[in-house]
Image: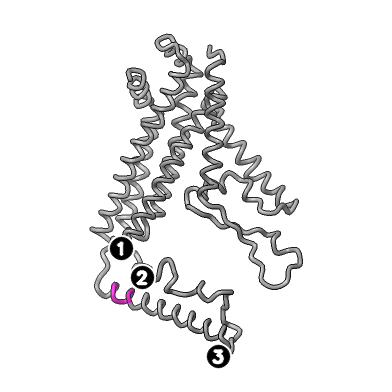
Amino acid sequence: MNLVRAELERLAARRFVQLMVVLLAVAFAVTVVTTLGGSHRPTEVELSRAQSQAADEVRRLELAHDRCLRIKAGTLAPDENDYLPRDCAQIDPAQSEQLPTASDYLSGVFVFAKEAKPLLYFLIAFLALFGFLVGASYIGADLNSGGVVNLLLWRPRRPTVFAAKLGTLLGGLLGLSVLASVAYLGAFWLIGQASGLTGRMSGEFWAGLGAVWARGVVLVLLAAALGFAVATLGRHTSAALGTVAAYVVVWELGARLVFQILQVGRPDRFMLSSYLGAWLAGQVRFWDDNACSTGISGFCDGSYTLGWPAGLVVLLGLTAALVAAAFAVFRRRDLI
């Protein structure tokens, strides 16, 4: 327990961590002030007009669905402007995940229920970057300056020291993520109450937002563990930054271009960013340009999806492998 407390104090006392926390607060403050300045409480006239537009759009969707059913049944001749999906249920308003609402037609009005998820994605992205940089600098600076050697003189058990450092990092980051999320979303909810609209916040809305938040927190912890592991393997903070830069340039950009030239099918399944997006969003859909270029006649669907289970397996497997390698190196390597 004393080791964990000491590591937590060391983590909080690091100037880089303090600077990143300040930047996090500044970014949040700028976003909140900008949103507050660009929003206003809608008048009764604005609400009435928006509700009328939403109702008109719903009726248009219902008419399009009814027309599709009649054309499929052969009781109505289609014209050149008709959109006919394979199944009319695809354009059925009753089966739509979200029907048009009045908030969709309000200009200059912040609606919490509509903007909460994009704002949460921004928060997660910032926290993931924060976690990676702090994780890399936390162990990288100690290895480069000899701080780990001094710590081992006090606690000469390398596995215990490694686990304490990583556990303290993840625990501290988890606490910060929870506090930042509550303060961040709470501030925007208050903006919706005072200078906008809260919108329709059903149980399904909160469940979906909670699922995104939970996956986002896991991503933040994985990013911190990755930064910690790569910096341990390279014995320097810059090793983690260089590894990420090299991966993006060589694989995400270079290999993607090569796959395109060679016409490799479904190239996105070889990219780590695809699994990251699948995990965070729950599911992502990609388009394979080569699927429908082989002379197939008729309808051809070149799309394919990646779900969050595949994203979790890839991200968790990569992180576990790098952390295990970092542990093995830290346990046996000369640290002086």
**Which residue is pictured at 46% across the width and 41% down the height?**
219
Image quadrant assignment for residue 172: top left
* Quadrant of image for the N terminus: top left
> As drawn, is 285 to the left or to the right of 180?
right
Out of 329 and 115, give the one closest to the viewer.
329
In three-dimensional space, the C-alpha distance between marks 3 and 1, rounded to whole angstroms, equals 41 Å
Residue 307 percent coordinates (x, y): 53, 52
User: Which residue is situated farthest in the top direction here?
Assistant: 153
- Magenta region, main secondary structure: helix
What is the span of residues highlighted in magenta in the rendered image? 47-51
Name the residue beneath numbered marker 2. 101
The front one of 26 and 117 is 117
Badge number at residue 199: 1
**Placement of 121 over or under 218, stated as above or below:** below
Q: Position of residue 241 (x, y in %)?
A: 54, 32
Q: Tally the marks.
A: 3
Label ID, residue 75: 3
Residue 49 covered by magenta stretch = yes
Disc 2 secondary structure class: loop
Residue 128 point in image, percent of width and height: 45, 40
Question: Eyeballing the image, is 295 above or below 290?
Answer: below
At 35% from the left and 22% from the top, the residue drawn is 4
Disc 3: CA contacts within 10 A as few (<14), some (14-19) or many (>=20): few
Dots 1, 2 in contact, CB < 8 A: yes
